[in-house]
Amino acid sequence: MNTVDSPSSVVREMIQVTRSFLPPRAEFDAYLDRIWATHHLTNNGPLVQELEAKLKTDLGVDHFFFVGNGTIALQIAIRALALEGEIITTPYSYVASTTSILWERCVPVYADIDPRTCCIDPAGIEERITEKTSAILATHVYGMACDVEAIERIATKHGLKVIYDGAHAFGSSYKGRSLMTFGDISTGSFHATKIFHTIEGGCIIVRDPEVAQKVLLMRQFGHNGDDHFLAGVNGKNSEFHAAMGLCVLNHFPEILADREKQWTTYFHAFQDLGNCSLLRPEQQLEFNHSYFPVIFDSNERMLRAKQVLLEEDIVARRYFYPSLDELPYISGAHVCPVSRRIASTVLTLPMYFGFGSRIRHVNSSGALRPVMRLGVMQPYVFLTGYFAYIHATYRFVLYDDGTIMRGCINSRNRIMVNGSGAYDHCSLL
């Protein structure tokens, strides 16, 4: 890679689409000391109970269960509500939303999505209801809110149960109420890639006390000591995972603030571009800024942008792809054109704690400044930490304090800001 007048060199490294937050080692070690002192490793240990108690308080719920992962959470939810027949669900979600339905021997029926939020469209739900329908399973995609009020009206009208897959919803609130608290049951994923994580983990939040008792038993093989009540599974989680969750929870406000800063920087850079569209959270949503999807105007443009990024060691992900109504093991599914279009044109850009300070810019005085850089190469949109393309039309230089400068790059790979040579002396990493 060429450099121009660079007073220092920086080793280039792969930028992943995400990177798990890790707390200071000493904080985690303090919890490990407690585990070593008690020898209590699993089976509803003190750290699991502590994490559950804190999350119940934070979310304002009565019945919260920490489980092994978000998929077993969905399966237990379906089983605890005794669902049968058809479950209306979204085609735009991670595959576990569908496979959980299949594993519980129910039939997923897809209703298309609202392009403004990528969440299930309530109008499509009502069109799919039959005498075989037992429930609605909806996903709060990217931390955006499903139309919870419309879904509740439909469910009440037709006597249906509602499960929300809240894998992306932790930290988002609607009208002052956590998105994790809607529906008959809400589930969560605390996988290492999520904005709040326990390395592996998930949760089940239940409204009805009787259903909550069933979830409690199902999570632990269906028995309490020597007394057996029902056929359960092993949905428990360990003290080590709870320890990580307690550590991450202590840092969650700063994680949210950091993510909002990155999301806002992206949004200001891309909001006026003509070849892609962005999701905009509604005013009544307190948004967790957990993902930044860019929806291109064609599959070809998206694939080219993905390849350009990869050539610069930057990983963007097609998330979600494919649309679940196109899964090879699903037969007779309703075609969902909006979901298929978005799934074929979406890229989510890198976002994780501390990302904005990883890339550095060398200005004419030689001082290092943290920077996030976004670029536009006509007609392709791409994120880059490297001013490497001499044929780019113009660039955004976005500092992590929110400052945005637009600069052209000339034939000598020198950045020209507002027609001046203020950034002639820059490092091309």
Image (cartoon, helix red, strand yellow):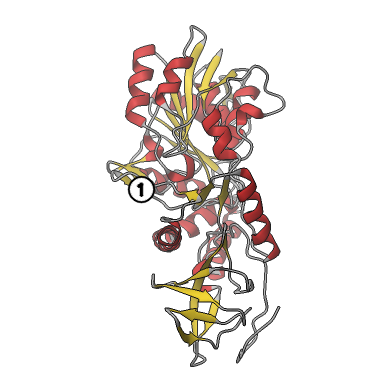
Q: Residue at x 64, y 73 (%)?
A: 388
**Which amino acid is tagged 1?**
Asp
Where's residue 32, x and y in %?
58, 61
Which residue does the numbered mark 1 point to in the structure image?
58
- Quarter of the image that includes the C terminus: bottom right
Where's residue 416, x and y in %?
49, 80
On screen, residue 317 versus residue 56, left or right, reads right
**Secondary structure state at the residue bearing disc 1:** helix
| Nearer to the camera, 13 or 176 | 13
- Quarter of the image that includes the N terminus: bottom right
| Nearer to the camera, 63 or 352 | 352
Q: Is residue 323 visible?
A: yes
On screen, residue 185 versus residue 174, left or right, reads right
| Nearer to the camera, 214 or 141 | 141
Where's residue 36, x and y in %?
61, 59
Q: Is residue 235 visible?
A: no
Where's residue 377, x and y in %?
57, 63
Q: Residue furthest top?
A: 131
Total marks placed = 1
- Give the quarter of the image for residue 299: top right
Q: Residue at x 36, y 31 (%)?
A: 148
Task: Judge whether 171 appears above or below 234 on screen.
Answer: below
Q: Residue at x 37, y 32 (%)?
A: 147
